[in-house]
Image (cartoon, rainbow, N blue to C red):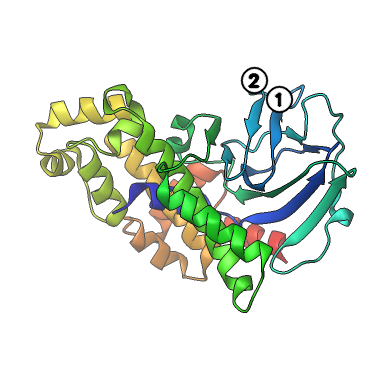
Amino acid sequence: MDILTEALASMRTAKPASVRTDGRAPWGLRLPPVAGAGFHVVLYGTCWLLPADDSSHSYAPIALGPGDVVFLRDGTEHVLADDPATPPETPSPERVEEATPIGRVRVGGDGAAASLLCGNYHLDQVRPHPMLAHFPPVIHLPARAGRYPELAAAVQLLSAELERPRIGSDGIVPALIDSLLLYILRAWLDEQPPAEAHGWIAALTDPGVAPVLAAMHADPAEGWTVQSLAEVAGLSRAAFARRFTTMIGEPPLAYLTRWRMTRAAALLREGDLPLSAVAARTGYGSEFAFGKAFKREYGRAPGVYRRELLTANN
């Protein structure tokens, strides 16, 4: 069971949104916060990533070059510009040109050109998976020969499809953008020295905790106990509980309940399974017990939660 993929999939609330941004110096864009994570891929040219004046995350300006990828974990407001001194403007939806396979925005004057793929991943901000908080607020992956080969290949494919759209591009580009999130996070994980990993990042490969997380995610309906999970870990009950809580930040059964509720919310969002079936798939013997647990976590009954989502999406 791929915990990273599972955790991110559980947070997805919609397909990624993206637009191609073509700028000619002088140009600057102030990008508003989004409910999820933001990303930029430099297709060609150079530019700067700058924190907004009132951003909750402060970081030094980052120079971006061709092939560079930047990921903003919390989707905070930020600025892209040809130069840190260029005053930014705020883009409006009306400026997005219809294009195949994604929309296009053109800004700036008649100077040096740069082109970026900009977008965001729509992620649940009410109950984000705790693993995401262990990634840095801003990840910059510079394009360098021999580094991040899979990510570099995905960026090259995206660039080719956007530069010369052909038959199939409308399907290929969204799929590449969707997979880009995993390539970004995996590339960052591969760069981390094992000795410096801690918390969730260490848990993903820990011989005692990783198998337990995989078991919980693979079968949340199983009647897991601390003892049965300790047996999966190959540790004593006390040693397992202590190790799990230290790495994950909460006791094993507390995380199991969190994951069950996360899966339940995803099932309610994604389909029309009867509530009794959702309850059974998430480890509850009755619809009543499931509804009580769900309301405790989400503040409303599962049926109400589903109806609110249907109303919001119509």
- Percent position of residue 265, x then y: 49, 54
Q: Tell me the amino acid under the disc marked 2.
A: Ser
Q: Does 184 appear above or below 192?
A: below
Is residue 149 found left or right of 252 in the rendered image? right
Which residue occupies 83% across, 57% down? 96
Residue for badge 1 = 55
In the picture, residue 100 is in which quadrant?
Answer: bottom right
Which residue occupies 54% across, 61% down? 157
Which residue occupies 42% across, 56% down? 288
- Percent position of residue 1, x then y: 28, 54
Specify whether residue 258 is in view.
yes
- Percent position of residue 117, x then y: 67, 51
Which residue occupies 31% across, 27% down? 193
Answer yes or no: do the residues labelled 1 and 2 have beta carbons within 8 Å? Answer: yes
Specify whether residue 15 is in view.
no
Is residue 120 found left or right of 228 in the rendered image? right
Residue for badge 2 = 58
Element under disc 2:
loop
Q: Which mark is residue 234?
A: none
Q: Tell me the amino acid under the disc marked 1.
A: Ser
- For marks 1 and 2, give the CA distance: 7 Å
